[in-house]
Amino acid sequence: MKTQFEHISVLAAEVVDFAPQATQTILDCTLGGGGHSRRLLEKFPEAILYGIDRDLHALKAATDCLKIFENQTRLKQAAFSELPECFENWEEPRFDYILADIGFSSDQLARPERGFSFMHEGPLDMRMDPDRQHLTAADLVNNSSEHELLTILRSYGEERFARKIVSTILAEREKKLFETTKELADMVSDIMPRRFKKPGFNPATLTFQALRIAVNDELNELGILLKEAPSRLKPDGRLAIISFHSLEDRMVKHQFRKWENPCVCPTDLPFCICGEKPLGRVLTRRPVNASASEVSCNPRSRSAHLRVFSFSEITS
Ligand SMILES: C[S@@+](CC[C@H](N)C(=O)[O-])C[C@H]1O[C@@H](n2cnc3c(N)ncnc32)[C@H](O)[C@@H]1O
């Protein structure tokens, strides 16, 4: 079993550059190995940093990484959906900067026993918090109805071969239940038509992505974060979100637009009567992407999109 935490923080310089100038309080919602948090505390050595991660292993790695800042960090194992409880217990009511670098870490992917990777043989698990989450990817594959599996693969994976994959799962699980990552990955690879196989792209990529999103309820989690963040930022506070696939990026983009322009009046009305007021402005018209040199050092950064919103009013 690996002992070191394997993860390179993406867009780290950009995350630090977007922090408000006199940042005193930070909330890192995805500590991972603590890389972003550490860079932020190096830039703002007086700041207090609160941090969560739903993965206990990540929390331990972040605690080690931030050891020299231990007097100014408050770290907790929690999911975004537990933020309301965290806010009740923390003394800090509002933050200057909230960061979320969502999705999974390279460390989770690199540990076969976590079951995230189609590259390694491991249990078909994919839970970010195996102690408190009950549903595994194997449970979904072995017990979901045809309709449920189709919805997962289509909605979260945008997998064009969803029907074929699901009908094979249904037939195979009658003979033997799926237990390991390799069993599922090999099955998807076997049924994928050769002409649709692309070099460097494992045929099971979208199936695994879809199952991971479903197991960890990732889109609902992001929705909760987007709901909670505005009332937890100080005036001029900023929310920075890094996402790795289009479903999440779309959610962030639309929410930011809505905060910037919440008016719901018909467009032909000469003035606004709905009374909805903008919460601030989008600082990133287009998502910030990794530079060519970052991608060459860390290929995973290729699909990272950073969006930042600056709040202008106290909202509650
Ligand atoms: C990309 S990594 C973060 C890496 C980190 N920024 C760094 O620099 O090391 C994403 C982390 O978010 C955590 N995570 C994902 N969804 C979460 C959620 N809903 N609530 C809390 N943590 C979550 C994962 O467990 C993972 O450790």
Image (cartoon, rainbow, N blue to C red):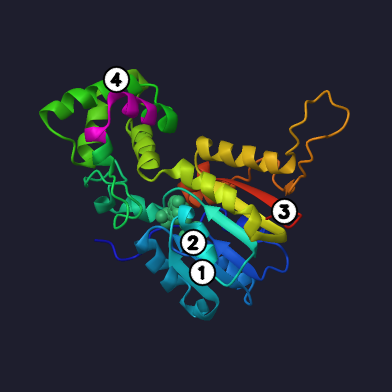
Q: CA distance from mark 2 to mark 3?
A: 23 Å
Precedes in sequence: disc 2 or disc 4 = 2
Instruction: Give the residue at mark 1.
Output: 89
Q: Return the residue nearer the eye: 13 or 158.
A: 158
Q: Disc 4 residue type?
A: Lys
Figure quadrant of residue 236: bottom right
Instruction: Give the residue at mark 2.
Output: 85
Q: Return the residue nearer the eye: 138 or 120.
A: 138
Q: Which mark is residue 311?
A: 3
Q: For disc 4, does the CB lie below 8 Å from ligand 1?
A: no
Q: CA distance from mark 4 to mark 3?
A: 46 Å
Name the image quarter holding the N terminus: bottom left
Instruction: Give the residue at mark 4.
Output: 164
Does 45 sit left or right of 262 as displayed? left
SS for callout 3: strand
Q: Position of residue 101 (x, y in %)?
A: 52, 52
Tell me where the magenta segment starts and ends, as one range: 141-152
Name the image quarter holding the C terminus: bottom right
Q: How many C-alpha atoms fall within 10 Å of the one at disc 3: few (<14), some, or many (≥20)? A: many
SS for callout 1: helix
